[in-house]
Structure formats: C-alpha cells, structure tokens
Image (tube, grey):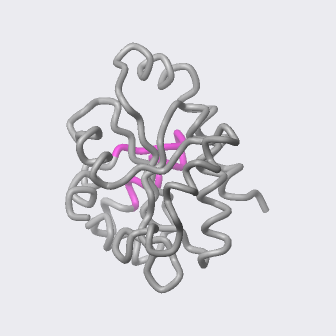
Amino acid sequence: MVSLSTQLSLYFQKNFTGIRLDTVRREKTVGYVRVWNYWELMTMNTRALIALAGLAKTGNRKVLAPRVKNSEFKREGDPLGTYFNITAFNHILSLNNYATLASEKHYEADCLLDNASHVVIHFLYGDQDTKQELHLNEKEYDYMRKSAAKGGWSKCPSLKYSIKGN
C-alpha cells in the first residue's frame, strides 16, 4: 500500500511541477497547502502533516495549520496550537528545510477563492459522506467520478461553496 504522502508527491509531480512554481515566482504570491480532513488519529496525522510540509516546500508553499477534534485533524475543532507550540514547531520545520505552518488569518488574507492559482484537491472515496460534503446528487457525483477516473482529475464547481462554508 502506498502512503498518502507518496500519493500526494506523485500527484503534484505529475500535475503541477514547473507550472505552479513558475506561477509563484512570477506573481510573487504566497502559496498554501490546506488539508481539511486527515482520517488517522493524532500520531499518524502528525506524521502526514510533517510529510506534507516537506512536499509543500518543493512548491514554495506554506501549510495551513489544521484544527483538532476528537484526536483527528478536521476543518472544525480546536486550533493546533492547543496541542503544539506552533512557534517551536515551525522553527523545527524551518531548520529542516520544510514548509512552515500558517494561521487561518494569513491564509484567508492571502488565498482568495477567485484567484486562478487556487487549486483544491479532494480525494473521491465513493462514500455517502463525500457526496454530502460536496453537495452532489448521485448523477453529479457519478459524472465527476468517471471524469476523474478517465483523466486523473475533474472540475467540481461545488467545492468553492464547501470552502466558503468552512
């Protein structure tokens, strides 16, 4: 079984290497990586978060610090700073040449939804929760799933409403 960090790394290398970095350098904007839901508990989530910070650095991005609810990283819950000293955590990440964690305040100020460089990645698991979260009926979800299976990705206009509703 391939780890999530390996899957993400391969996906980013295949789809964004060169294009995204050039865009970042030309526009001189701050880039972010944001994950809403890690399905493991705190220990494995922390490992995945650190791996994501390593990957984000290759794209000159920061990682939005997730929230914690019931020992899982989620959209809602307590700030990660409740569990970690974020300043010290960022210092360790920076010393090891990893991307640092950013606050929601900085993310919201820098990352506007109407910006063409705003990319959202949502893994399709085919379960009812995914359909509900994306506000898709069976036909819409099936179309998106088939498109993603064919080309590796699919446009999903409803994601922007999900993002705004966080």
On-image quarter of the N terminus: bottom right
Q: Nearer the viewer, residue 115 or 77?
A: 77
> Image height check: is 93 above or below 41?
above
Can you name the residue that lies furthest to the right here?
1
Q: In the image, which residues are magenta?
A: 142-155
- Taking the spot 24% from the left edge, 51% from the top edge, the residue there is 160
- Taking the spot 47% from the left edge, 25% from the top edge, the residue there is 20
Can you name the residue that lies furthest to the top here?
26
Give the image location of residue 54, x and y in percent. 64, 44
On-image quarter of the C terminus: bottom left
Give the image location of residue 55, x and y in percent. 62, 41
Can you name the residue that lies furthest to the bottom here?
70
Q: Nearer the viewer, residue 128 or 83?
A: 83
Q: Main secondary structure of the magenta part?
A: helix
- Taking the spot 51% from the left edge, 74% from the top edge, the residue there is 83
132 drawn magenta: no
Q: Nearer the viewer, residue 64 or 92?
A: 92
- Taking the spot 60% from the left edge, 78% from the top edge, the residue there is 41
153 drawn magenta: yes
